[in-house]
Image (cartoon, rainbow, N blue to C red):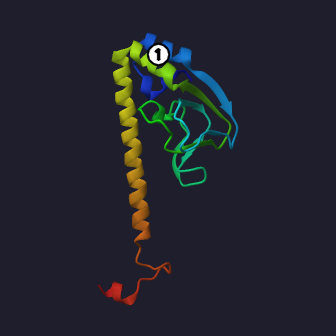
Amino acid sequence: MYIKQSALFWDMDKDFVKDLMGIAVRETYQPGDFLFREGDPADHFYILIKGRVKLTVGETGPVVYTVDRAGEAFGWSSLIGREIYSASGVCVEPTVLDNFHRGEFHKVIEKYPGPGLIFFKRIAGLIGNRLLWSYKMITSTAKSDASPSFGSGQMQESEAAA
C-alpha cells in the first residue's frame, strides 16, 4: 500500500506525495494498543495500511467510527488546528499505520500550496462524510428509542386506537 492509493492523495503532484512518504513512519500495533486518548495532544495524523482501529468517545465510551479500509485517514484533529484529540483511538486487531507528525506534515503542505489546498479540501470532505454518518447513527438511535412499544413489543391500547 502506497500513500498515493489513499483517496486523499489520488492524482496529486508526485513530488508532494514523495515528500509526504518521506516523513511517514510505518508502525505496527497490537490489539488493545491506544494510539491516542481523547484529550491527548493532537500531534499525529494516520493512514491505515492494514488492521482495524476503533474511535471512541473516551476510552470505553461508544464507538463513533471504525477505521478498517486500507488508505483510510484518521487523527485529522492534528491537521485542522485542534490542540487535542476529540476521541480515543484503539487497535482492535494487529494494525499497521503510516504515522505523520503534525509539524512535519505542515512543512510539506507549506512547500506545496496547490496540492496542500486540494488535500485540505479532501480532508473537509472526509470530515463532512463522517459528520453525516454520525447524524444517521444518531437519527436511527433516536427512532429506535422513540418506539411506543414500551419494551414489550405491544403498543398501549390508547396509542393503538389513535
User: Does residue 143 appear left or right of residue 78 in this picture?
Assistant: left
Identified at 37% across, 47% down, the residue is 132
Picture residue at 67% right of the left edge, 30% below the top: 28
Residue placed farthest to the top in the image? Answer: 15
35 above or below 116? below
| Vertical position of residue 35 compared to residue 6: above or below | below
What's under tag 1, amino acid-wise? Val
Q: Position of residue 162 (x, y in %)?
A: 29, 84
Residue 109, position in %: x, y? 41, 18
The reply, left or right, for residue 75 in relation to residue 160 is right
Q: Quadrant of the N terminus?
A: top right
The residue to which callout 1 is attached is: 17
> Of residues 130 and 79, which is closer to you in this image?
79
Is residue 154 placed above or below 30 in the rendered structure?
below
Q: Residue furthest right?
A: 30
User: Helix, strand or loop at disc 1?
Assistant: helix
| Residue at the outermost left position | 162
Label 1 environment density (alpha carbons within 10 Å; few <14, some 14–19, many ≥20): some
Tell me if residue 87 comes above or below residue 5 in the rendering: below
- What residue is rendered at 56% in x and 54% in y? 61
Q: Position of residue 15 (x, y in %)?
A: 45, 10
- Most foreground residue, 111 or 30: 111
